Image (cartoon, rainbow, N blue to C red):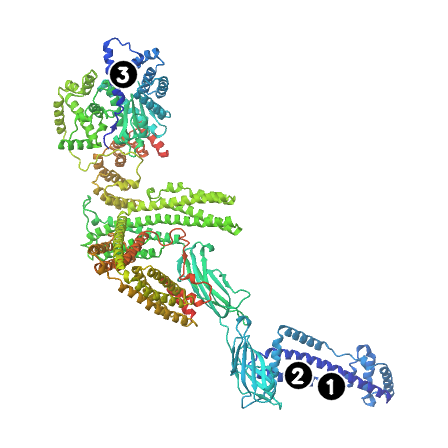
Amino acid sequence: MSDRRRGRSGWLLPCWLLLHGVALARLAQAGPSSGSPAQRALEIEFLLAQWQIEAAEAALEPLLARAPQQPEVLAAAASVRFHRGDHEAAVSLFERALAADTRHLLPAPLRELAGVARSTAELVRSFVSTRSPGGHFVIRTSRGRDQLLAPFAGEALEALRGRLARDLGFAPDEPIVVEFYGAPDDLARASPLTVDEIRRSGTIAICKYNRLMVVSPAAFPRGYPWLDTLSHEYVHLVLSRRARNQLPIWLQEGLAKLFETRWRTDDAAPPPLSAVQEHLLDQALARHRLIGWGQMHPSMAKLPTQQATALAFAQAQTAMSFLVAREGPTAPRRLVEAIADGADAWEAIGLVAGLDRRAFDRAWRQYLTRLGLRPYPGLVPPALSFGPEPSHEQQIRALRARRAQDLFRLADMLRQRGQRAAAVVEYRKALALLGGRDPFVANALARTYLELDAPEQAIESLTPLLAYYPELAGPQTTIGVAYLRTGDHQAAASHLEVALRVNPFAPELHCSLTQALPRGPRRERHARLCQQLTHQPR
Amino acid sequence: MHSSSEIDRFILRLRRRVRRAESAALLALFAGAAALTALALLALTPAAESARGPQLAALLAAASWLLSLAWSWWRLRSRWRDPARLVARLGPQHRALRSDLLSSVQLAGAAPSTCSPTLLAALARQTSEALRQLPPAGVLTPPSWRPAALLGGSAALAWTAALAWHPGYWALAARQLVDAVRAAPQVARQPLVGAVVLEYRYPAYMGRAVVRVPDTTGDITAPPGTQVLVRATSTVPVSHADLVVSGGDGGLALRQPLGVGPHGVLSGVLTVGDAARYHFELLTGGARALRDPIERRIEIEPDLGPKVALVGPPNDTAVNARQQIELGFGAEDDWGLSQVRFVYRIDTQPPTSRTLWQHPVIGAPARYASGTHVWDLGALELAGTFTLRYWIEATDNDVIHGPTSTRSSVQRLTIVNREQQHAQTLGQQRQLLEQALTLLAEHLLLPSSRPRSLRHPPAPAPGGSRLAALLEQQTRWVAALRALNQQLRRDPLVSAVVIRSVAALVERWHALLRSAPTGTAAAPSYYRRSIVALERDTLLLADLIDEQQLQTLGVTARELQSDRARLATLIARWREAPSPALRARILREMERLGQRATQLMQATNRLHATLPDEYLNASAVEGLAVGRDLEQLRRLFHARQLGGVEALMAQLDGKLDQLQRLLDANVEQFRSARLDERERVWHAALGTLHELQRQQQQLAGATESLVRSYRQRGAQLLEDRLAGLVARQQPRAEQVQRHLRTTAPQRLASYHREEIERTLRWTGWLQERLAAHDLDQAAQLAQRLADGLEQVGADLREDTLGDDVPGWREPQDRAIAHVERALGLAQQIAEDLEQALPRPSTLLREPERRQLRELTQQQRGLAKQAAGLERTRDGDVAGDLLGERGRELLGQARRMMRDATGQLGGLEPQRAHSAQQGALQQLAELQLLLEQSRRPGPAEGAGGERERVAIPGAESFAPPPAFRRELLDAMAESAPSSYAQQVKQYYRELVR
């Protein structure tokens, strides 16, 4: 799967606010702030644009007391409520503001925001809210299957919050709202993004309006690394709040990538590159096709291809890894603080690493070469697929070689008739034609080996695949089951938990984890989920 | 003594009385017995083979009667002589007197010493005194009349019954008996009669006119029941004459008295019964009985049974239970038909018959009857497989011996449930698929057959026994494939392309088996090739099965559509004229529709197990909710809401169309996905064909324009000679017309009639074109007319089938003569016009010649392209795409293209144009063939299942007059080869 798409759109409102903010700053310099309610309201919007939620709230209170019926004030109050995740209140206030705005003074971006608030309120009206164990997150999901996401999300976010508070020096005090939507189209309703933009860019999660908006992994046939994505967005939130949204995109993404796995490991060392990242970086280095830092602005999603975007993410991540490797684990915090204090990105880097832009770039490239990057022949960066789960027939027809399709069908027919050993031969032939790493064929082969009670061969058939594409829930589950059969519970749990991070809805996953995990609450939780999901209609 | 004489007188009187009474009783008894004996004798007489028997029997009977009578009378007489026995006859009421009388008689005859004379005298006196008081008549015990009464009564009853039953029989028997015992007359040396005239009056049912045959030998040949008026002239003076009929081998004679007219003319009427002989017996003036020496024959012209023929589909034709079978029948009888019935029998059930033709109550006898009958198998409501036997029975109108029925040959049809048959075929295919998979698995698990890339330790090659075992398995599998191939050809629901695919598969495997190694060294290579073949062909079998299953759904949907159409017709009829029978039929049809819809849904659901939903669209099919609509339809009909019914029917029509399109799309999608290679080749071939047609059409158009332009120039050149030329041809054309009309086409077979009418039309057009001075068209028409007349003449000459039919040949020969004359004239017209018209080579300008050269090249190129199509093969998968018929059509098209090329090059564009048109026709047929090759067998489309199995020339089975001519029309039509033998066989029967 390629790097995740995250939308940074909705830039119209911030730009508008920025311009006004500049004007306001000038005004503020002129003297004590005794502006009109409208100006004050604008200031509040500006604070919100800078992710200064508390400051905005503090500024709102007297303003409300002063001009409770003024449309700008009402709109500002609505915005604040919206940024606190109180959508119903926000909608009500927006409606009052719009009703009071007889002279149409409210700017278009606010009106748009009112629309977003309204559709968001409608969307989550029937949602269920769950508090994380530490109470720092309010997780909203639709009733039903998505409810099982809440406990895992809560645990991951609490763990990450603590570590980021230490490593970046900031953690929001108030509970952060996390919303899981059932479909990518719902994300469009809750954000300024359009459905087309979401599908084109592959955006599945947004950090915006002081909350995390994530599409449920159930919306995708094979899931996606949703916990890492969720963590990634939370890192964005922390960075935005800490640095008042002043970090450049590449730096934001680099830091988010650096810390997105911190929920599951407290290892300060930079996370390893995935096979896809390594491959892309290696190819780009060899061909001198690295993406310039400026090209990543204003959004990674604006890059022309998915591959370019994935490369950009990899570059950003390795840039931060380089910084950490060079300056230690506190480098990110110092960097963020410098920018929060007013330095621009390169000034901050200069402060932290003592390198100007060119030197940084050079040093970083050297760092890359020292990493020992290698290409992965035959690797095809996976794409996020929208839409319903493809049928078995569609998956067969998607195999790129016709002969492989035929062999697969024959293998299926043999397997259905109990001729498993013969089916293995045909599956292997098909897999060989596809380069040995096709997820669909490899998984079918491994499953057949398991039916033949040959778990070692199952593991053997999946290992090359997972070396390239670790984020495949199906094969990870299969290999986990295979390890269980060999008695290696630790390895089984490791693989099964990878699967859990990608697609937590498979009953077999939880049932297998129940066997793989040692006794304890986690095991019990998975046992419950095994029971629940096994008997739940799909 | 006085008293004794008194007693003696008494005894005497008594004796007389007793004698009379007992004689009468005796005679009555004998009379009764004689009557019964005579009845018995008469009963047996007609059956006697000769007169001897009855004669002897009569004599014996008479003799025995007489002897018995004499003996009985003698016995009675001895009793009468004995006074004592006489006295015993006195009745019981005179017991005392009887005793006295008996004593008197006995004592009077006794010796004097035994009795006192005085006492005796006193007894005598006393007895005579008593007797004086009694009349002898009163003292007798009358004889018992009971036996006589019984016999007499029985005889009377028997005679009454016999006469009531058949008086004629007894009269005949009596005559025969009398004649038998009478003394035979003397046979004359010379004929006694001459100038015999016979006048036949036939039975009314024959409708024959009276036939008078003068100066005949006297031999009679007539059907039974004919009354023959016999008139002859006696050569000797005669006072009485008889016509004596005797059966064969000297059987009993029947004597028919003849009237004797002036000049010795004898006349009488004889009714013909059985074969016999007769002669004249005369009683001359001198009372001399003479017999004419000539025995004349009475021969029976039997009323033969009817001839009947049935024309229908070939024996054991497989049809489905809903089809309509068209049958033709013809019956002929020598004297008249009364009825023609169609009889059929389902398996071993009793036969059922239906009258096809009935002679009207009033009307002349009909000797011929013919017609057609459409047998609606659907009305039999059969489900399953059955054998139907059917025939035609014709009955004549013989009222003399009773009607005779004749049966045609018994034909057979097999009702085959196509779906069941196809299910069996599919089952066979599935079995083969399973065998293939098992075989594949065994091959794959052979160590030596594993590809080297897999990390397995190399294993030794299989031993010889293993090789042999696998070869045997392969051979068995291929044998099963061959059997499947045969079965597929018999299944009407299997498309041609499937049949060809399997045939190609069989061929490939034969080739593979032939290459099987004998030793183990080459075994691994052979196994690998076997695996490749098995992999490919297993998938092919699986895909063909799935394709057929999907097509079967489409067939069911089409049947649903035709069922709906039929139901709509019935409902329309119901609107016009409701009836309980029609209502019941409508409900049955609705039931059937519902069952078929359910069948379709069930089949779709069953296919879910093996076919992905991409190719089934089960939810879309179910979403049409056809079953629900049918249920609603039934409810509306029950509620008599006809408007609602009709609206729902219209809606159902739309849904069924949609369903059909959906199912067809499923099949296409399946083919694109799984049989893409075959489809690619098929579409490519079709595309090539379309391109060929398009190019050929273009060339033909260009050629035609060219022809038109130079012809117009030619006509202009001829303008000054035109009037004269036309004036010469017009009378010829009129003569052609006259000749054709004189052929009297109404007397010819309809096929010839049609041909002649066609040529008459052409003649008319020719005249029109001549009148319009359109020489070009006129020349073409004249040539066409000549060709047509030549064909008509040839057909007429070849038609010898009716040669044995009286009156058949003459109009035919006359028609031939006229057609030949017309042909000569038409040929003259064509020749004159052709000669008058300038040659293309003289009319063509240089640009046109250039154009012709270009056209020639293009046509040549096109012929080569067509050759490429012939080489189209779907690699190893679908085999021969075109099939034998397709190659034939393509070959003909190429030939015509080559002809056109030659004709274009030879500056004969007009002929080239005809060849081009011919090529286009062949290509169009080929296109149709290709398009149909992927569809299941026949009977597609609306009414497909109800397709009528027709017989050739069925329209000719109109009511006669000329029965044979109508039937011959069937021969004249170009009957499908499957019927030809039937029709020929029929005709052979007919003319026997």
Q: Residues within 10 Å of mark 1 (few under 14, many from 20)?
A: some
Q: Nearer the viewer, mark 1 or mark 3?
A: 3
The part of the image, by quadrant, that contains residue A321 is: top left
Q: Is residue B886 visible?
A: no
**Closer to the camera, B349 or A411?**
B349
Determine which residue is flagged by label 3: A47
Displayed quadrant of residue B967: bottom left
Identify the residue position indicated by label 1 in the image.
B77
In this view, the residue in front, B650 or B825, is: B825
Instruction: From the top left corner, tell me how far across and down residue B679 is, in percent.
Output: 28, 48
What is the three-letter code of the residue carrying label 1? Arg
Residue B65 badge: 2
Q: Nearer the viewer, mark 1 or mark 2?
A: 2
Q: Judge from the rendering whether residue A359 lies leftward or rightward of residue A465; answer left or right.
A: left
Q: CA distance from mark 1 to mark 2?
A: 18 Å
Between the residue at mark 1 and the residue at mark 3, the CA separation in whole angstroms equals 174 Å
Quadrant location of the N terminus of chain A in the rendered image: top left
SS under mark 2: helix
Q: Which quadrant is the C terminus of chain A positioned in?
A: top left
Q: On what subunit does the disc labeled 2 rest? A: B
- Subunit that carries the residue with mark 3: A
Amino acid type at image mark 2: Trp
Chain hosting mark 1? B
The lab-note entry on whether marks 1 and 3 share a chain reads no
- The x, y position of residue B587, in whole percent, is 49, 48
